[in-house]
Image: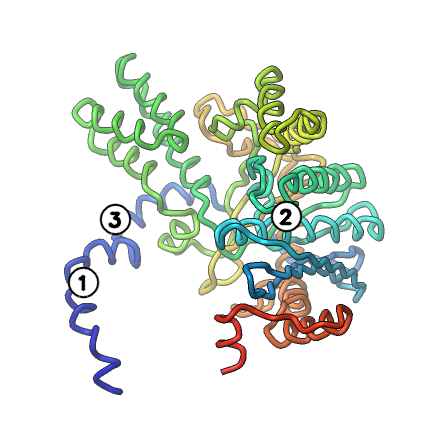
Amino acid sequence: MECEKLRFIDLLYEKALSKKDYLLKVVSEPEKRASFYRSLLLKRWFALPPEIEIVDKEIYAIDSSDGIIELAGGGVIHIVRAEALSNRKNEIRELDLDAFYPPSDERLMEYRKLTREHMEHIVALKAIQRLGSGDVILIDGSIFGRMAHVFQIIDIPGKEDFMIKYIETFYELLRACIRENITLIGVAKDSRSTLLKEALLAELLYNKIERYNLDVKLKIVTLLESLRRYPRKSIEILRGLANEIDNEDLMILQELLSDMPDFKMIMITRMALGFSHPLKLELKNISSGFIESLFAPLRRKELAEKLAIQLSGRREYIEDILRTLEHMVSYPAVGSLYVRLMENDLPIRVDLVHRDIEKWNVKIKESPFSNFVRFATSEWKGIISEIIGILRGLYAGLKNYNVLLTTVDKHVKLTLSIRERYKKIIESILDTLIQQSRGVRRVSFP
């Protein structure tokens, strides 16, 4: 047995040695790189505001979970549930149950993620009916990430039009929060976003390019514009610029093209307790063909017609899809920032939907590619201080970054034992045994 455990050790050692530099680049970062980012972040980093009493606010935390019962023959029974739990012990529960034949594991995983989010939106709308002006809803994850979902035809029989329902509900949630003056907060423990890093680098670079001639300036601006939509094009532009700009500016462009996320940037710079300067995120600023079509009325209608034909082979869905796309155009702006609440803890990403965010001004003449809120704009400081004060009040250390969210996560999680219990209940209602796939039976009944 011991020999069996060691049989790949030689290969592991060989590969780790050959890829040592690459591994170190991801696992740790050179001090020079950390110092560079630290100098940028310090200009956009603020001390934590004091904790505030939250007894006068009701705060609902919302989370979801799902599970599948795999059936012999390729079908699945899909169970998804969500819960909202408030700091006043109030609770809202929701559960849905379905059965279908997924075409692939990849399509199933994609659909499951969307249904969990959709169930959270349904529960959040119910929570709003119990809340008053100034109250708060917490959701686990990025709000802007949900806004950025591309409208797609779901490749699962009977679920093809699911995105219509998803976007309609999400739009109604966002609109209700603004109408009722309820703050919607998305809290993410992990994120691959590079938006903060890109804003810092673009701001720095734009302040330096005046030294170059018009041709070089245009190349740099084109690279910034094509950064995420056309990465290969950006790399080609960078190669062409290598001999036309100084080494420091070349390094900035290389960092813009790197995939190091904001989380890693904040970790390697060892920033003190505090929070980053908020960004104002708007869907129209995402560079993609889908978004460009979305915000051009004629192209939006053409897109709706194309999607309607994909959905049914006919045009009967065109009005529903067009209305849904128009809802996406009307999504509100999102405030986004990172917060460090304890020295040895990871930062958290915080997304905000609030009625005042639309007023935040980001027209910084010195850097049109930066979406930092203006320093001179005082409106954001009160909102951000209040929200971070609430998050501090709900923070309980390394293993409990938010007492409400971690509690509702435990309540809603669909464990294997719960799934087995659900299976038996369904069997009793159907008055038949559910025959599971062979692989599941081997795991469940060794």
Residue at which label 1 appears: 15
Of the pair 199 and 290, the residue shown nearer to us: 290
Q: Position of residue 83 (x, y in %)?
A: 72, 61
Is 5 located above or below residue 177 in the figure? Answer: below
Instruction: Please tell me which of labels 3 and 1 falls first in the chain.
Output: 1
The span from disc 3 to disc 1 (Cα, nearest Å) is: 27 Å
Whether residue 19 is visible, yes or no, is: yes
Kindly give the residue lying farthest to the top in the view shown.
Answer: 214
Q: Position of residue 265 (x, y in %)?
A: 38, 49
Give me the disc on residue 32: 3
Whether residue 393 is visible, yes or no, is: no
Which colour scheme appears in the figure? rainbow
How many badges with numbers are in the image? Answer: 3
Give me the disc on residue 385: 2
Circle 3 residues within 10 Å: few <14, some 14–19, many ≥20: few
Residue type for callout 2 = Ser
Is 131 located above or below residue 400 in the figure? Answer: above
